[in-house]
Image (cartoon, rainbow, N blue to C red):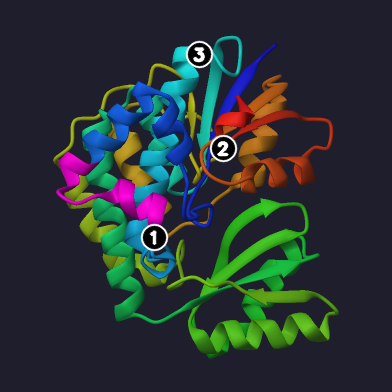
Amino acid sequence: MKLAILCPGQGSQHVGMGKDFHDAFPSARRIFHAADEILGFAISRLCWEGPDDQLQATDNAQLGIYVTTAAIYEVCKELRRPPGPVQMIAGLSLGEYTALYIAGAFSFADGLKLVRARGRLMRDAAAATPGAMLALVGADDVVAEDICREAAPCGTIVPANFNAPGQIVLAGTLAACQEAARIAEVRKLRAVRLNVAGAFHSPLMGIAAAEMSKILAGVDIAPPRLPVISNVTARPHSDPAAIRDLLVRQIIAPVCWRQSMEYLRGEAVDHFGELGPGRVLTGLLKKIDRRANIVNISRVDGL
């Protein structure tokens, strides 16, 4: 058996996440309490009690998912769930930071500070440069690129997430996304506007990327103990300098999730464990490869 851990990204957050792990396991309680102390406010209470509109905010959602996933990982490590040694780790967008923490590239505290800065910078960039994200259902890579080219006269628009076959997300200015939706309708494709604050993983996040580069320069990063797949390259990270560069590029570049999962399958990974809130990555993996064996551990009963 060859096992990979998958860490979810923004969009998996929900009120109540991680509360059952906190109540049942001291290792999870230590993570939540440490996060509250480091941040200076109760991210734990926001995760468990909301209100939902505050938890859905970009900065809070990213913090909540990082902390919850880290708490679940600590419990799984203690109980040896999923069973067997982990060979590789991947995380979707924000989840890449959780994956790097699990692999020992930086401490929980440093990861928390990075995620806090990332969420704040992406939130502020979205407010400064309004944009949108649009899911294309049924489009392949070539069609998505064609739609972006046709909509480009209306503004910046690029593929932002290659999630699964037939599921590609575009990001760009409001006008360009509206035009892309019109073009998709003409092509008999379904286009769904996502409920997000801005055009993440696109050039409209340039200000956030520039500031994140400065913050990453001040954090100690070690070579990961296990291969962690980069969202940008769909290949394992290497040295700390390259990790810093790719985490900056990740903010403005498309998330190559489908390609990352295809790489893992090509490396003979045959078992997966999604650790963290929600079941988004479990659903995407089943669309990428129906034969993949995946365990979802988002609640205590999943253990």
Q: Is residue 43 above or below residue 289?
A: below
Q: How many numbered discs?
A: 3
Asked whether residue 95 is in view, the answer is yes
Where residue 42 appears, as percent x and y from the top left, is 24, 49
Where residue 88 appears, as percent x and y from the top left, is 54, 22
Q: Quadrant of the N terminus?
A: top right
Tag 3 and tag 1, C-beta contact below 8 Å = no
Tag 1 and tag 2, C-beta contact below 8 Å = no
Q: Which mark is residue 50?
A: 1
Q: Is residue 89 left or right of residue 286?
A: left
Q: Is residue 76 above or below residue 244?
A: above
Pointer 2: what residue? 298
Choose between 127 and 159: the one closer to the eye: 127
Q: Is residue 202 left or right of residue 302?
A: left
Q: CA distance from mark 1 to mark 2?
A: 18 Å
Pointer 3: what residue? 79
